[in-house]
Amino acid sequence: MEIETRSKKVICVEDLRRKVLTQELEPGAYLDETELSEAYGISRPPLREVLRQLAGEGYVVLHENRGAQVSPMTHKTLRNFFVAAPMIYAAVTRLAAQHATPAQVNRLKDCQRTFRQAIARGNAAERAVENERFHSIIGDMSDNEFLMPSLRRLLIDHTRIGMTFYDPRKTDMACISATAADQHDEFIALIEAGDADAAADLAVSHWELSRAQIESFVTPASIQFPLGRAPGALEQRGAS
């Protein structure tokens, strides 16, 4: 019975992580413990353990007397995200190139294969989750207990933001995905070679690819059509 409960908790944790990352559970939404308990077949005490774990990882926020809320995304969150992302990605990737083990490199290669498969299938959610996993593995390689919590939190919002604008049917998005996948291959090569400086530089370039996508999404294109005459303007046709 204990083993079965533990297995259900693992399934619950992994599924809730995925639903948050893909925005199936929207930012700011409150979670109903009764519904979750029934959906995953676990009682309230182990469910609350799951929610505490997810809160520690940054997926949810726990409020006294109000329960668990999917971590909100605000203007402040986005602003801080843009400030912190390049610094954290560069630092983590530099350390990964210095400390990665052969087993970790093989995990990264396996993840890259599934990432490319998700792109080929045009599966936006799978692509987002595999991209998050790829960079999480790089985080594990860094072996730094101070940077990892920041990276995990960063990747949650990076994945959620990406889910808001990624459309595999658009030609420009397909090109960007191809570039991102090629850069993933470069990450693997540089980390395997132990080239810390080049790996850190690539992390910044990889971030710039995402930043440009995000900025193009949140900054609408100029409106290009005639605005017409101002109200009350006099007709000037035929005037000499």
Image (spheres, rainbow, N blue to C red):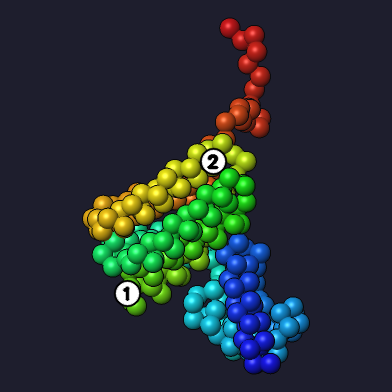
Rendered position, 93 above or below 62 = above
Circle 1 residue? 144
Where is residue 99? Give x, y as percent. 28, 68
Label 1 Cα crowd, 10 Å radius (few <14 / some 14-19 / many 20+): some
Q: Amino acid at mark 1?
A: Asn
Mark 2: few/some/many CA within 10 Å (<14, 14-19, 20+)? some
At 48% from the left edge and 58% from the top edge, which residue is drawn? 110
Residue drawn 47% across and 54% down? 112
Identify residue for label 2.
Answer: 174
Q: Position of residue 176 (x, y in %)?
A: 48, 43
At which x and y percent is residue 220?
54, 43
Image quarter in which the N terminus is found: bottom right
157 vs 188, left or right, is right
**Total number of numbered discs in the rendering:** 2
> Is any atom of residue 88 visible in this view?
no
Q: Is residue 77 above or below residue 113?
A: below
Residue 112 visible (yes or no):
yes
Q: Secondary structure at mark 2?
A: helix
Q: Is residue 6 above or below residue 126?
A: below
Q: Nearer the viewer, residue 82 or 3?
A: 3
Q: Quadrant of the C terminus?
A: top right
> Mark 2 or mark 1: which comes first in sequence?
1
* Residue at image coords 36%, 49%: 186
- Looking at the picture, does residue 2 appear above or below residue 185? below
In the picture, the disc for residue 236 is: none
Q: Residue furthest top?
A: 240
Q: CA distance from mark 2 to mark 1?
A: 34 Å
Residue type pointed to by label 2: Ala
- For the point 53% across and 59% down, the residue is 130
Give SS at disc 1: loop
Image-based side of 74 in relation to 37, left or right: left
- Tell me which corner region of the image, top left, top right, bottom left or bottom right, holds residue 230: top right
